[in-house]
Each structure stands twice: as C-alpha cells, then as structure tokens.
Image (tube, grey):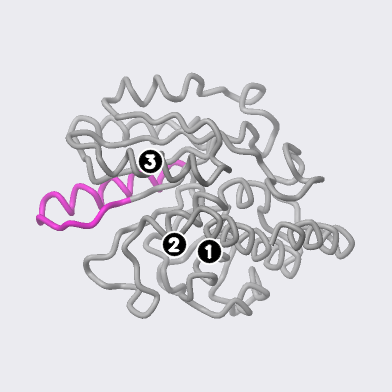
Amino acid sequence: MTDDELRHVANEIRKGVLVGTHAAKSGHPGGSLSAADIFAYLYFEEMNVDPADPRKADRDRFVLSKGHTAPGLYATLAERGFFPKEDLETLRHIGSHLQGHPNMNDTPGIDMSTGSLGQGISTAVGMALAAKHWGDSYRVYTLLGDGEIEEGQVWEAAMFAGNHALDNLVVIVDHNGLQIDGTIEEVNSAMPIADKFRAFKFHVIELADGNDMAQVRAAFEEARAVKGAPVAIVAETVKGKGVSFMENQVGWHGTAPNDEQFEQAMAELAKEA
C-alpha cells in the first residue's frame, strides 16, 4: 500500500474506535487513536497475516501489551476483514466477542489475551524464543504504552530478549506522554526510554512522529533489516490523535464520547477521508 492508502486505513481505524467506544459508553479511545497509524502499518503492510486463516502456523504474531486499547486493535482487525465492522458496535456488551481487553479464545486475529500491564511483552518474548527454538520464520510484534513501561516486568522481559538476541522481536512503545492519572512525568517517568532499551542490548529506533506514515514506514523497514538484536521502536505520538478535542487531553484516556462528541469527532474524521 502507498502511504496515502495507509493514512486512509488509519483514518478508518480511528472511526472504528469511536464507533465502538460510543456504543459501549466506555472504553479507552485516547491511546487507541494515538496508535492507529502503527496499527494500520502493521496489519496492512508489515505483518504476514490472513483473515481467512487467523491461526495459520507461519503467521506473524502481535501482542497488544497495553490491552486496554483494544478498541484500536478491534477496529484494525475489522478493517482488515477478520470479522464484520458491524461487530464494533457490540464492544463491551454481554455476549460480544469484543470485550474490554483482548481475548484470544473468542476473537479472530487475537494472538494473546492481555490486560494486566507489563505482561504482554513477556508473552511476546516467549513467542519469539519459541520461533527461534523451533526454527520458525515468523516475527513477533508487541505494542506497549509509555505508562505501562513503569512496570518492572517490562524490563525483566527486555533483559531476556536482549541477552538472547531475539532479532525476530519488535517492541513498539506508544510514547504519547499521558497515562490514566496524568503525564508520565507526574506519575513515574521512565525517561529516557531509548537509552533504557539500548542498555538492554536492543537496536533502538527513535520515531520522531509515530502519526506520520512515511516515518512509520521507515522505522519498520529499518527494524526488518536488523540482525542479532531485538528492536525497540520508541514512537512519539499524540494521545487522541485525529479528534481535535481529544488530542493531548489526559481525560480521554478512558472516557467514551457522548452523542454530541461522537458526531463532532466523526465529522472531523470524515474531512480527512
């Protein structure tokens, strides 16, 4: 896909995030919107996946370590054809396969059930190690939040990945600067993020604008060429990206839009189509 086509996909993903959280009257739009461009590139350009065969053995794996941004992943999977886009309107409803956090047992395209922050990267490291052990060719990608990396388990997993030279692993940090209780500086800053991953023997790519598709493409192309070390992409993003009144507002971490806000947000995204 061209960058323009991928930008269109990311815009559709953002619409899906709003549809789901508005219908649920709950959920996490802010971090879903900030990661939409990364989701779009992963599922429409980078990863070897097949909606007709979600469990195919040689597929690339994706672990949403910041599992609360499931609305973004669900919107991506629906856009990619893993299930009907109409299902997004059932987000968090009783009986729906789209719950508040990803469930690998119920939802096509989900490789790992996540939600407890810090644990997703450990699972991704295990998947990458298994591929190395069995001689499999698949790659493993995991998306973390910059608030999430305050968890110590993240760094235990990073230590293992670096020491075992898991060059089939790509860790992406959605560095939007905000978490549920405020800025990461106010809560418990993990800065400098890039230097920490370097200390754990990662090849680090500092992505200056993780909402710019050309830069996203360049980062993943560089990551694919790395041999002998895991990769960490530290992506500077804007929380709530694409919706004017949500951008850089910590209150939209876990708040759903009401009817009026939903209409305004969808109208803004329609202009970007």
Q: Which residue is drawn at 76% across and 38% down?
A: 249
The x, y position of residue 55, in whole percent, is 30, 72
Q: Name the kind of residue labelled 3 in the image.
A: Val
Residue that numbered label 3 is attached to: 171
Circle 2 Cα neighbour tier, 10 Å, few/some/many (<14 / 14–19 / ≥20)? many
Q: Which residue in the protein does label 1 denote? A: 76
| Residue type at tag 1 | Thr
Secondary element under disc 2, as helix, strand or loop, is: helix
Image side of residue 15 versus residue 214, left or right: right
Q: Residue 121 carries which label?
A: none
- Which secondary structure lies at badge 1? helix
Q: Name the residue under label 2.
A: 44
Camera-nearest label, 3 or 2: 2
Q: Nearer the viewer, residue 86 or 69?
A: 86
Question: What are the residue bounds of the magenta stretch?
Answer: 118-140
Instruction: Tell me the residue at 29%/29% (across/down).
Output: 202
Q: Which residue sits at x=51%, y=37%?
A: 148
Q: Which of marks 3 and 1 is nearer the N terminus?
A: 1
Which of disc 2 and disc 3 is earlier in sequence? 2
Front-most of residues 140 and 273: 273
Expressed as whole percent of the image width and height from the top left, the position of residue 252 reads: 74, 46
